[in-house]
Image (tube, rainbow, N blue to C red):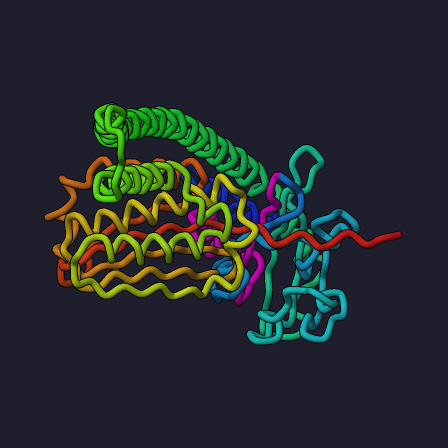
Amino acid sequence: MLNPARNSLFDRYLGISRLLAGQLDFNSIIQAVAAEISHIIPHDHLDVCIKMLDGKYHIAYESGIETAWSKHPPALLTGSPIRTLLSGDVDFLLSPDACADPRFHFEGAFASPIIELSLRSRLHVPLKVQGNIIGALSCSSHERDSYTMEDVENARSIADLLAPYFFALRAAEQAKRSAIVETEARAREEGLRLGALKLTEALEAERQRIGMDLHDQTLADLTRLSRRMERLTGLRELSGETLEPICRTLQQCMHDLRQIIEEAKPTVLQLFGVAEAIENHLERSVRESGQAIEWRMIDESDGALVDLDQTVATALFRIVQEAVNNAIRHAQPKVILVRLASRERILSIEVDDDGHGLRSSQDKAGHGIDNMKTRARLISARFEIGGHADASGTSVKVTLPVRPKPLPEAFP
């Protein structure tokens, strides 16, 4: 004669199997089967934790009461209250009162939901595939001493039904993540290739500009100076009045040449660092523009700019230089503010103006914006440009992580 209770239990297992069909993510599976599981093992809280493929982290999915376990990002296995089960040290965990059970409470354990939600009776069984533990199924009740070894055996049967689905989903998730990482890597590589090409073009344009400046300005001045001196060679006496225009032309030529050299290689940056170079460029650019512009620089970088790699420092300076130049040339601002900040190992530099806004000046500064983006990309920095809420002014911001200063080596 068939046992009605056994038949009912078998029907529940079949119901779980049917509910699993077509579920495509962890949360969907848990929500789909939770009601059927409650007929087999009554519970106030049900969760499944899945070990990540690296074996160091795990992530939880819940049904019923929502706790911090499922809200938490992947957590270290060493901090799990059921780490002994997940590592294979024990075959199951059964506790009449987990709130007072020392197995769940140890230094570094993420066990606060047990106390906060009074999850007293707890049973845990592993999810196994081909002998390997991929996670755990857990049931909890507010009542003490709610579960028996019979419940443990039933939980093992349920775990055997769930494990293959979770194993397949974990593999699919990992494949998806790998594909995303590979796609992002290819996109970064292509972005760097295009960025390097744009920067090369920009450098070539800059080289041509310097060549034209030297040809049209400095060389022309020197040519005129040479011709004047040739005319003077026939004179027997040279007066101060005769030499004064030559000296003035020579001084102007030297000044122009220094400016060309300074633009090609910012000596203030080399000698004093990024902050001083930015302040120097800001002050000089505003002064030479002849515009009534108020400028300020706020340095809250706490020394984070001091130890930057020279390539990174130069790129940051060039980005700020371009942003300041764009604001002065195209936006007609009344105020330009440059803010340097460093918080939680993130360095940020922001150039803010109250001029005409991005739309009115973007066409004129288009190539400059491309150059700024390229320079930021080549040093793995984030570049942002946008207008203010009232559509006036422009904000250019660059952020990048900075590595902590290395500790000095101790002498033996």
Residue 120 percent coordinates (x, y): 64, 72
Kindly give the residue lying farthest to the right in the view shown: 412
Nearer to me, 228 or 50 = 228
Residue 35 percent coordinates (x, y): 46, 56
Residue 134 percent coordinates (x, y): 63, 42
Residue 205 found in image quarter: top left
Q: In screen coordinates, is 376 left or right of 211?
A: right
Tell me where the magenta segment starts and ends, as one range: 26-53
Which residue is pictured at 48% across the width and 56% down the height? 346
Where 252 falls versus 191 (above or below)?
Answer: below
Q: In screen coordinates, is 118 left or right of 347?
A: right
Q: Is residue 4 visible?
A: no
Which residue is pictured at 89% across the width and 52% down the height? 412
Which residue is pictured at 37% across the width and 37% down the height? 261
Where 235 falls versus 274 (above or below)?
Answer: above
379 magenta-colored = no
Where 255 falls versus 232 (above or below)?
Answer: below
Residue 167 found in image quarter: top right
Kindly give the residue lying farthest to the front in the view shown: 236
Nearer to me, 73 or 70 = 73
Which residue is pictured at 34% across the width and 45% down the height? 319
Q: Is residue 222 visible?
A: yes
Residue 249 percent coordinates (x, y): 25, 38
